[in-house]
Amino acid sequence: MIFKKKISKIIFYLISLFFVIGIILLLLITRLEGHKLVSNPMAERDLIEKTPDHFSLSYEDVNVTSEDGLRLFGWFIPSKNGAVIIAQHGYKANREFLLEEAEILNRNGFGVLLTTVRTHDNLNWRAKVNNHDK
């Protein structure tokens, strides 16, 4: 009888220990995965390799300078029907990721302005690094 109680206690403690270890591992994995979602290191970003030329789209390079002097770049694909759609890439992407959508929209008559956000463009990366060095 005493032996069964000891075995039961040991099993209970082992199950509890595995449960606590499982919770700790789950929290650690969640934290690491969450960090991946909110961080976007420059070393892991994709450089722009394709332009609208790759989709036989006529376009012009456009840019705007922010108040602090950083130039933000984009591509403007002219409209055939007078309507223009402004397309903004996602957090871990760049304007190249929207070229297929821009091609479909333009094929259906729409103009498209593909914009970028701070430090998500080839030239902006160098500007960002240089600003940190100063």
Image (tube, helix red, strand yellow):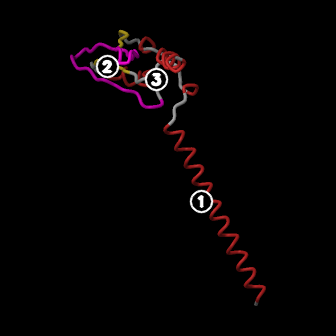
Identify the image quadrant of residue 86: top left
Name, please, the residue furthest toward the front. 134
Q: Which of the two discs, 1 and 2, labels the residue nearer the N terminus? A: 1
Name the residue carrying label 3.
120
From the viewer's side, name the closer residue of 130 and 116. Answer: 130
Is 21 drawn above or below residue 30 in the view shown? below
Query: What residue is shown at x 63% (from left), y 65% (from top)?
Result: 19
Numbered disc in front, either 1 or 2: 1
Q: CA distance from mark 2 to mark 3?
A: 19 Å
Residue 41, position as x, y percentages in the image: 55, 29
Name the residue carrying label 2.
112
Query: What residue is shown at x 35% (from left), y 12% (from top)?
Result: 62
Identify the image quadrant of residue 5: bottom right
Say what secondary structure mark 3 lies in: loop
Q: Amino acid at mark 2?
A: Val
Looking at the rendered image, the quarter that the N terminus falls into is bottom right
Query: What residue is shown at x 42% (from left), y 23% (from top)?
Result: 118
Q: Amino acid at mark 3?
A: His
